Amino acid sequence: MRILTSAQACGFGPASKLVAVSGLLRDSTIDFIGEGVALDFVRRHADRFAAVREGSTSDGAAIAGALAVADVVISVMDADLVYWAVRHRRPVLLFDSLLSFWDCGRSITDLARCAEVVRDGDELSARTAYDSLAPHEQVLLAHLLSTRSFVQNFPGVPERIKELAAAGAEHIELSGPILDIVAVRSALAAAPSLDEPQLLVNLGGFKNFYLDYDERNAYLTLIRRWVLELAAREPDLRSIMVCCGAFSTPEVLHVGGTRVEFTFLPHREFLRHLAHAPLYAVPPSLTSLHEAVIANRMPLLLPEQHYGHIANRRMLGDIAVGRHAAALESLGNRFTVAEDDFEGTRELDELVRGIMTDEQTYAEVRALLDARYDACRALSLDEREQAVGELAALLDGNPLDVLLADLDLTALQAIGAGR
């Protein structure tokens, strides 16, 4: 069974889910095509794939050859790959961790009509219908087009599943964490090493449709400065590790007696550190929240990198993890951004740039981060476990390995051939 895969190139979350899924399909030949941070992440885990190739799934001609030899297609929030797979009559498995986040300016009924055109119309009609949709709407369309969909639980997700089911998409299943469970369990079972950091900071892949490592990177500068100042303020922290795709060239600094390392680790190595780090700080990324629950680590939520993180944090409501978040909005209205994925992310980047050019404003943000760090560190182990329990209750769902254990790829292949 040959499977063609790709993942949305927005942070490491989608690619990490693809790696997790690939680990549960060991008897198949799995190929990857993609770009950006998704490609970076997959290259670090190339042992899970038969072939890893750089390319854009938006270019139908470029991936036509790969689709021609594929029996099944797997997409993690990559709507373009779903579009081309359906046009090539290939069965598609879609995995999504953001179902409740996607903004839709149309009715689901309109999307269902669009899906019919994409599936059965001529090339021009199908392409016109698909291109008429906004990026978020294209992902929702992908759920209507897919053969089966698996969506990671989060507040609002069950309601959207029902909404899509009412339009005929009864193949969407609620899932628990779409994580590399084997790697997480292995990390939890392993003995801690002598170099375990006392504070682990995870900034993920960072790059998305707007942010990058070289220019729109003020957030990385902000967290880097705060971490180094925290090391000076907290001399009992012997070791701090900051992980991010931007740090592909590792750097080690010493602040007094504290070792501070900026690095980009293979995910399995990162999970080993997460399993044993006493303190864990991360932006409100859904993948990171699920990993924290599995590792039983209360996450200190850092300021948001992009608008999606703002939406994630708000959905946490009044649980302890949400109350301890270092949300920029808590500093007043001047730290609010547009309620839109692209514009909100752009404004957030500009806002952080302004923070880094004004010492008084930076001092306010630093004070917020310090206060949240101090409050989290002061919590007892029982209080932290209770906080993780509250978070786990929001994220619960059927285990991914159980859902995929019932998956009959041969039957899916037959469905695709019959279309």
Image: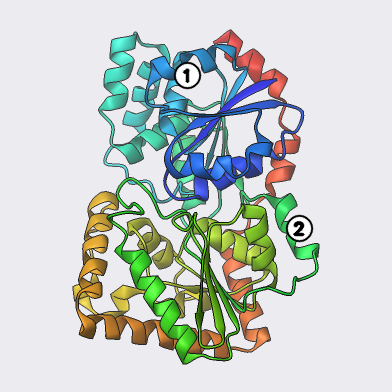
Answer above or below: position of 106 versus 238. above
Instruction: Indicate the quadrant where residue 416 lies.
Output: top right
Mark 2 residue type: Arg
Residue 231 visible in image: yes
| Residue 337 screen position, x and y as percent | 23, 64
Quadrant in which the N terminus is drawn: top right
Q: Position of residue 403 (x, y in %)?
A: 70, 40
Residue at the image point whose x is 29% and y is 51% from the top: 341
Dot 2 or dot 1, earlier in sequence: 1
* Quadrant of res 59: top left
Question: What's the amino acid at mark 1?
Answer: Val
Horizontal relation, residue 33 to residue 313: left or right? right
State which quarter of the image contains the C terminus: top right
The residue labelled by disc 1 is 86
Q: Nearer the viewer, residue 70 or 361?
A: 361
Per the rendering, the mark at residue 185 is 2
- Residue displayed at 62% across by 79% down: 198
Residue at horizontal 30 percent and vertical 64 percent from the top: 218
